[in-house]
Amino acid sequence: MRTPFVAGNWKMNTTVAEAEKLVLEMLDGLGRIGGIEKVLCPPFVSLVAIEMMLKGSTIKLGAQNMHFETKGAYTGEISPLMLSDMCEFVILGHSERRHYFGETDEIVNKKVKTALTGGLKPILCIGERLEEKEAGKTEEVLSRQVRNALDGIRPGGPSGGSESRQTQDEHMTARLVIAYEPVWAIGTGKAATGEEAATTIHFIRGIVADLWTEALAQDLRVLYGGSVTSANIGEFVSQPVIDGALVGGASLKAEEFVGIVERTAEIRRA
Ligand code: PGA
C-alpha cells in the first residue's frame, strides 16, 4: 500500500510575509486530513519561517531545488546540507529548471544522488514537451529521463551500500518520489486526462521495474502534475496507479490546495 502524496510547489511566488499568511490559511484545514503525506515547497527564503510554523503539525516541508555539491565556492547556491536540517523533501529536475536554467539529465542525476546521500527525499520531475508528444516520442523521452536520473543509483543508495538487502530496499523506495509532469500541461490549464496520465505512469513504473525490481517499482510513489485543481484531482487519484499530485498554481490558494488534499485522501480511503 502506497501512502498518497500531495505537494504544493509555490515556485517563485510569495514574500516571506505572504508565505506565512498562506500557511496560516491552510494549517488547520490540512492538519485535519489524515492518511496522506502533505508537503509544502515554498521559496528558499521562507523555509526557516515556515518550518517553525509547521512544528508539531503533520505537514512536511520541501525545497524546490538544490546544488549537487554539499559546500564550496558556488555563489548563490543552496546545499543539501543546508536543507536537510529543515526539509524532508526536495523537488529536482523540474521542467522549468531544465528549460530556463539548463539543467541536463546529468545534473539532475548528480542532484538525485547528493539528495539521497544527504538524507533528503527527492521528488524527481520528468515529462515530455508538446513537440515531443506530437512526434510520438513521449515514451522515449521519459525512459531517457528516468534512466539518466537514476543512473548509478541502486537500491540501498547511490553506490550500493552495506546494509542488508531488505533495509536497502526499504530505504530507496521510501525516499524517492517521481512526479510525471507533461510540460504541455504545466501552468496551461490543459491537464492531461486521468487515463492518459495513468497509462504513462504505468509505463514509468515499468522503467523503474526494469532498472531495479518489480517490487521496488510497485512501492515507488508516482504523482501526476500539470494544471491540477480541486475540480480535476479526482480524475487522477481515482486511477490506482497515480499516488497523488504535484500542484503548482492551485497550491497558492489555500482553499484550493486543501480541497485537493482532502479529495485525494477521500478517494484513496474509499
Ligand atoms: P501547475 O504546475 O499546477 O501550475 O500546472 C505544476 C508544477 O509545475 O509542478
Image: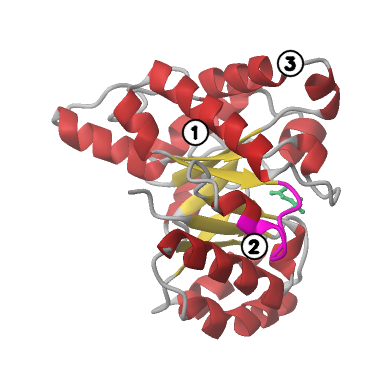
Considering the numbered disc 2 on the image, is that residue within a helix, a strand or a loop? loop
The mark that comes first in sequence, 1 or 2, is 2
**Residue type at numbered disc 2:** Pro
Prevalent SS, magenta region: loop
- Of marks 3 and 1, the one in the foreground: 3
Whole-percent x, y for residue 1 in the image: 33, 49
Contact between marks 3 and 1 (CB within 8 A): the answer is no
Camera sees residue 65 = no
Q: Distance between the residues labelled 1 and 2?
A: 20 Å
Write the residue at 37% across / 49% down: 2
Q: Quadrant of residue 44?
A: bottom right
Q: Which mark is residue 112?
A: 1
Q: Residue 137 carries which label?
A: 3
Relative placement, left or right, of 173 versus 164 is: right
Q: Looking at the image, which is closer to me, 200 or 212?
A: 200
Q: Look at the picture and state if 117 lies above or below 81.
A: above
Magenta region: 226-234
For the C terminus, the image quarter is bottom left
Q: Looking at the image, which is closer to me, 266 or 100?
A: 266
Relative placement, left or right, of 117 versus 52 is: left
Considering the numbered disc 1 on the image, is that residue within a helix, a strand or a loop? helix
The mark that comes first in sequence, 2 or 3, is 2
Q: Which mark is residue 241?
A: none
**Residue type at numbered disc 3:** Lys
